[in-house]
Image: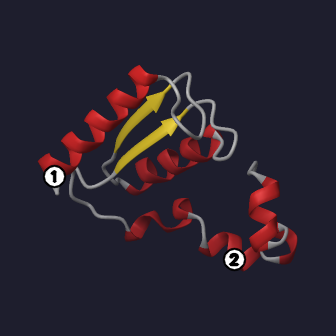
Amino acid sequence: MAYDTGYTERYMDVPENNQQGYEAGSVALHVEKLPNEPNRLLILHGFLDENVHFFHTNFLISQLIRAGKPYQLQIYPNERHSIRCPESGEHYEISLLHFLQEYL
């Protein structure tokens, strides 16, 4: 599985030496603990994110579907780990605030 090795391995060592830690830290391997109610999980992801690769979001969504867990997904196609485009940033903030106001 792809991940940001420079950051991750600094704190967690390599997966071969810390399999238990990597498994414990993977949300995708613990989706059964997530709520069953709709509008409780919002996933926001920059498609070009070089730190959290989209592969991880894809795997998480696959696990959510397999477990029958509801989720909402917002993808920012031209954004990386930090949103830089003002229009994307505004959309992100409005989407997040709406979700929190509506469902918190």
- Residue sitting at x 41%, y 30%: 89
Q: What element carries label 1?
A: helix
Q: What residue type is labelled 1?
A: Tyr
Image location (x, y in percent) of residue 98 = 19, 40
Are there few (<14), some (14-19), or many (20+) residues within 10 Å of tag 1?
few
Residue found at the very far left of the displayed protein: 102
Image location (x, y in percent) of residue 51 = 68, 46
| Residue 95 relative to residue 12: left or right | left
Q: What element carries label 2?
A: helix
The residue under label 2 is 21
Image location (x, y in percent) of residue 79 = 56, 28
Real-space Cα separation, disc 1 to disc 2, in angstroms: 32 Å
Are there few (<14), some (14-19), or many (20+) residues within 10 Å of tag 2?
few
First in sequence: mark 1 vs mark 2: 2
Task: Identify whether 77 is placed above or below 3.
Answer: above
- For residue 32, which numbered disc appears in the image? none
- Residue sitting at x 81%, y 65%: 9
Image location (x, y in percent) of residue 91 = 33, 28
- Residue sitting at x 69%, y 70%: 22
Q: Which amino acid does label 2 sit on?
A: Gly
Task: Identify whether 77 is placed above or below 69.
Answer: above
- For residue 103, which numbered disc appears in the image? 1
